Every structure is written in structure tokens, then in C-alpha cells.
Image (spheres, helix red, strand yellow):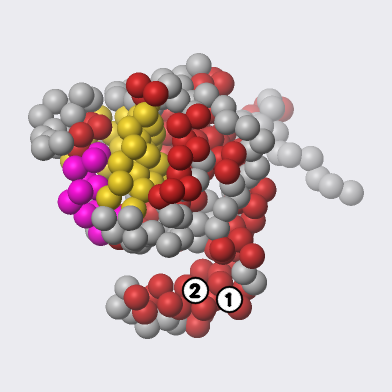
Amino acid sequence: MTSAAPEGPAGTAPPRARPARPAKWLLRRPGPDAAARVFLFPYAGVGASMYTLWPERIGGAELLPVQLPGREARLREPHFGTYEELAGPLVDALAPHLDRPFVFFGHCSGVLPAVEAVRELERRGLRLPDRLVVSSQVAPHDGPYGRLLDLGEDELAGELAALARAAGGEPHPDLIELGVSVLAADIEANRRYRVDAPFPLPTALTSVGWRGDEVIPPALMGGWSAYVPEDALREVLLDGAHYDFLKAPAPLVEVLAHDLAPLAPGTETTA
């Protein structure tokens, strides 16, 4: 026998659950003086702290890393499930901060929740991003793609350990075990994200490929041209490998500055 939900005062219905606090979803609280905002989505297995080395602003635009459930400060929360299931609560949390021009940026699988957030905003008739910037990710109808999709947990642990060493650290077994559980759940979300054909995206789009990227070779990113009109697509090819974006290299910052210049007066660009 299950117990009924507690009633409110004088027998009234219980209050509805409060929507997710925006502070849970963003690494930093948005500032009131920003001319524009860039929401940064993390890739599989990690959280918003992956953008630690990025600047907090590019000109008049503030950069806001997005924190997804089930990792870092939100580790005790359940995993979000699928990207389609994530889109609703994600948009609930971001909507109050979409009161000025904004851009979504995602790298690798971090592109996928950004895409579904765009689609959810369109379904609700809410303000849309002025641009979606996709880095090192195949178009949805060309996925799921990536060698991690076929790896078991032991192999994933090896991948995380190698990444930790590449970053100058020494992998800790407990942290690796924890990281594998998050990564495995995110990879399952990638496996379940299947799109049969391209669909129109109601925003401009910048596609960023990396010449030395062996994870997502830039030649595989051509499918994005089917999602927006030709005059809304900007294709960029930068020097570097798959993980070089983590340090916010100057050429990538310049790409973002170019896209932000019309949205945030005073944002300088040499492009």
C-alpha cells in the first residue's frame, strides 16, 4: 500500500514541484550587463568544468557553461536519459536567460543536447538562438558515430586514464570508476539518438572542423549543410586535434568573436 502525497494547508492540493533552479544548470550566474550570451555544452562523460580554461567573456558576450544532471555538482541526480528527454527541463532552466541575443556552442556529443534544445525552443514558440556553433560532430542523420560507442567499461576506463595523463594528471581509480559510469550513460544516450533524415534548424549555423581530428575527421561534417539554408551556414576549418578546443585556442575564440560581433557591440574580430 502506497501513501498519498501530503496535502497543503486546509486540505488544499500539494504545491507543484518547483522548476529546476537555473543555478543548477549553469556554472556561473548570468550577469545583467551582457549584450549577448553563449551557452557552452559539455561532451560525453564530463561536466561544465571542462570549460575552465575558457574566458568568461568574449567582448560584450558572456560565456556560460551548461551543467547537465548526473555529474560533478549534480552527481547525486539521475542521468538525463535521452537528449529528447533532456530538452524539456533544459529549456525550462535556460528560458529566463534568453532575454537577449544568444548562441549555443557544443563540441562532439555536446552538440546533440544543443540541437534538441533548439528544437524544443521552436516547439514552444520561444526565442531562438541567433546561431548554433557545432564543433567536431557529425550531423544528426549521420550518427551515431564514434569509436567509443563500441567500447566496454574496461576500455572506457583506459580511455579516461589516458586523458587524465594527457592533461598532466595521474588517474585515481575511484574517480575513473565514477567517470566510467557517467561516460557509459552518456554514450548510451548517443546510441539512442537516431535521426533518419535532416530536419530544418531555425537558426544560423557555424560548423567547426579540426584538421588533426582523428575522432571526428572534418570530412565527415558536411552533412550539416542540409539543416540550414546556404546563406545561414558558415564552415570553418582550424588547425588542431580533437581536444585542442579545451584550451580555447585563439583561432576558435576568433570564430566565436566573428559570430558574436553583430550581436554584441564592441566585440572585436579580425576575420
User: Amino acid type of disc 1?
Assistant: Glu
Q: Is residue 57 above or below residue 92?
A: below
- Circle 2/circle 1 CB separation < 8 Å: yes
Name the foreground residue: 192 vs 221. 221
Q: Where's the C terminus, which quadrant?
A: top left
Q: Which residues are magenta?
A: 245-256
Is residue 77 visible in the rendered structure shown here? no
Residue 132 position, x and y percent, is: 39, 34
Q: Nearer the viewer, residue 38 or 137?
A: 137
Number of numbered markers: 2
Packing grade of label 2 (10 A; few <14, some 14-19, many >=20) is some
Q: Secondary structure at mark 1?
A: helix
Above or below: residue 101 compared with residue 30: above
**Toward the viewer: 258 or 6?**
258
* Residue sitting at x 43%, y 62%: 214
Apparent side of residue 210 relative to residue 222 in the rendered image (left or right): left
Q: How far from the left and from the top, in percent, is residue 186?
A: 57, 56
Query: Disc 2 on helix, strand or loop?
Result: helix
Disc 2/disc 1 C-alpha distance (Å): 6 Å
Mark yes or no: residue 212 visible. Answer: yes
**Which class describes the residues within 10 Å of circle 1: few (<14), some (14-19), or many (20+)?**
few
The part of the image, by quadrant, that contains residue 128 is top left
Residue at image coords 70%, 33%: 7
Query: Where does label 2 land, which residue?
Result: 159
Depicted 204 relative to depicted 110: above or below:
above
Kind of residue at badge 2: Glu
Residue for badge 1:
155
